[in-house]
C-alpha cells in the first residue's frame, strides 16, 4: 500500500473517533443540564427540598444551582408584585397590588406545600396564576389578619375611580 492511503485511513479513523467523543460529550452535557442543573431567576425566591431528609432550605443566590436529580428538588416562588382583583360580570369591584414576602416562606410552604406551581395558570379563564389565586384569598381575608408571606403594596377600590 502506498503511504498516502495509509495516512488517509489513519486520518479518517482519528476524525471518526474525535467526532464520536465530541457527540458523546455533547449528549452528556445535555443530560447533565436537564438532570442536575436548575436556574433561579433574579425575580424568584429559590428553595431546595431534600427528599432524603425532608428538609426545605432557602437558596440564597440567583443563577444556576447544581444538585443531584431526584434527591434534591428545586422550587421557585415569583417575587414580582401582582395585581389581584375581585370582579363580577366583567366589572372590577376591588383590586390590590400584592407581593410575596420571602420572610414567610416556611409558613407558606407548611400551609400550601411545595407542589403548587407558581407559574401555572388556574383554569378560571382570567390568566391568573396559582400563586396569585392563593395570595388573593389572603389579601381579601375579612378578618384583618396579617400574614408573614403577604405584603399588600396598594389597594384600589371601585369608588376611588371617577366614572
Image (tube, rainbow, N blue to C red):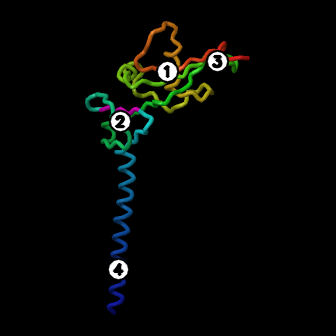
Confirm or deny contact between disc 4 and disc 3 (CB under 8 A): no
Q: Quadrant of residue 126?
A: top right
Q: Is residue 48 magenta?
A: yes
Q: Which mark is residue 73?
A: 2
Q: x, y (%) of residue 91?
A: 69, 18
What is the crowding at mark 1: few (fewer than 14 residues within 10 Å), some, or many (at least 20)? many
Label 3 to label 1: alpha-carbon separation? 16 Å
Residue 138 horizontal side relative to residue 25, left or right: right
Q: Nearer the viewer, mark 4 or mark 3?
A: 3
Label 1 to label 2: alpha-carbon separation? 23 Å
Looking at marks 4 and 3 on the same chain, the residue that comes earlier in the sequence is marked by 4
Looking at marks 2 and 3 on the same chain, the residue that comes earlier in the sequence is marked by 2
**Extent of the magenta region:** 45-50
Residue 83 horizontal side relative to residue 76, left or right: right
Q: 46 and 80: which one is in front?
A: 80
- Residue under the image location 31 percent in, 30 percent down: 57
Q: Quadrant of the N terminus?
A: bottom left
User: Image height check: is 155 above or below 58?
Assistant: above
* Tag 3 residue: 87
Q: Is residue 140 magenta?
A: no
What is the crowding at mark 4: few (fewer than 14 residues within 10 Å), some, or many (at least 20)? few
- Which element is circle 1 on? helix
Dominant secondary structure of the residues highlighted in magenta in the image: strand
What is the crowding at mark 2: few (fewer than 14 residues within 10 Å), some, or many (at least 20)? some
Label 4 to label 3: alpha-carbon separation? 72 Å
- Which element is circle 4 on? helix
- Which element is circle 3 on? strand
* Tag 1 residue: 135
Confirm or deny contact between disc 1 and disc 2 (CB under 8 A): no
Q: x, y (%) of residue 53?
A: 26, 29
Label 4 to label 2: alpha-carbon separation? 46 Å
Amino acid at each position: 500500500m502506498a503511504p498516502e492511503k495509509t495516512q488517509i485511513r489513519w486520518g479518517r479513523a482519528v476524525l471518526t473517533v474525535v467526532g464520536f467523543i465530541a457527540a458523546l460529550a455533547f449528549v452528556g452535557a445535555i443530560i447533565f443540564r436537564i438532570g442536575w442543573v436548575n436556574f433561579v431567576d433574579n425575580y424568584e425566591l429559590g428553595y431546595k427540598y431534600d427528599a432524603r431528609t425532608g428538609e426545605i432550605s432557602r437558596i440564597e443566590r440567583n443563577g444556576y444551582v447544581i444538585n443531584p436529580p431526584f434527591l434534591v428538588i428545586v422550587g421557585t416562588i415569583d417575587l414580582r408584585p401582582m395585581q389581584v382583583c375581585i370582579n363580577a360580570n366583567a366589572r372590577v369591584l376591588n383590586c390590590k397590588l400584592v407581593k410575596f414576602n420571602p420572610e414567610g416562606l416556611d409558613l407558606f410552604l407548611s400551609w400550601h406545600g411545595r407542589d403548587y406551581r407558581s407559574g401555572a395558570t388556574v383554569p378560571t379563564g382570567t390568566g391568573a396564576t396559582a400563586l396569585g389565586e392563593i395570595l388573593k384569598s389572603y389579601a381579601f381575608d375579612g378578618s384583618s389578619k396579617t400574614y408573614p408571606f403577604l405584603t399588600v403594596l396598594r389597594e384600589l377600590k371601585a369608588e376611588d375611580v371617577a366614572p
